[in-house]
Amino acid sequence: MSNIDSLAKSIAENLKSRGETIAVAESSSGGLVSAALLAVPGASAYFLGGAVVYTRPAKSELLGISDADLDAHRSASEPHALVLARAARARVGADWGLAETGAAGPGGNRYGDAAGHVCVAIVGTTETVRTIETGDADRSANMERFTEAALRLALETL
């Protein structure tokens, strides 16, 4: 079992035992966070929905984030990750919102972040956000690391 699978299973068990739910908003992980949580049997008990919000229009249309909120903080930042997590949670009425936003690579983003930069956030009864720098330009490897970082943060917070 991979780290990602193990983390997702632990999150699922935790959420199910507490009768709580989660929603996901992800960007540079490309849906891997949602896929990991959905791969655990019984996901319908705790997973309410997820969206890959890779662009501004997706964030507006899928999560209902206002232009003012999108303009308030640059993408791939901790405040932006919190906005995404709050919106995912609110949009489907979940107990928890989990979000990821970063630069998977092979190059950095237009905001000056190097490849391997990611911000992950979880919002529920508490709010926690974290920035991670992998120092790697490998897009696929970073997508997996970003997924693991989001799931690890969720498990630590839950």
Image (tube, grey):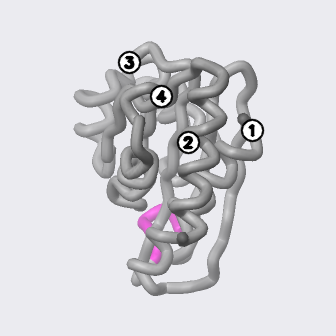
Q: Amino acid at mark 2?
A: Ala
Q: Position of residue 79 (x, y in %)?
A: 62, 39
Crowding near the residue tagged with mark 2, few <14, some 14–19, many ≥20 C-alpha atoms within 10 Å: many
Q: Residues within 10 Å of mark 1 (few under 14, many from 20)?
A: some
Q: Earlier in the sequence, mark 4 or mark 1?
A: 4
The secondary structure type at the circle numbered 3 is helix
Mark earlier in primary sequence (4, 2): 4
Residue type at mark 1: give it: Thr
- The residues bearing labels 4 and 1 have C-alpha atoms spaced at a distance of 16 Å
Mark 4: which amino acid? Answer: Tyr
> From the viewer's perspective, is 115 left or right of 128?
left
Quote the CA–CA distance across marks 3 and 2: 17 Å
Relative image position of residue 81 (x, y in whole percent): 56, 42
**Residue 110, magenta (yes or no):** yes
Q: Is residue 108 left or right of residue 63?
A: right
Q: Does residue 69 appear in this view? A: no
Q: Assess whether mark 2 and mark 3 are in contact (beta carbons under 8 angstroms).
A: no
- Amino acid type at image mark 3: Val
Span colored in magenta: 108-113
Tell me the distance, in whole angstroms, between the alpha carbons under discs 4 and 2.
Answer: 21 Å
Q: Which mark is residue 157?
A: 1
> Nearer the N terminus, badge 1 or badge 3?
3
Name the residue: 69% across, 49% down. 153
Magenta span includes 14 = no
In this rendering, is residue 15 above or below 98? Answer: above
What residue lies at 54% left-to-right and 38% top-to-bottom? 98
The residue tagged 2 is 81
User: Mark 4 — residue?
Assistant: 46
How would you classify the magenta stretch by its main secondary structure?
loop
Q: Identify the residue position indicated by label 3 in the image.
A: 92
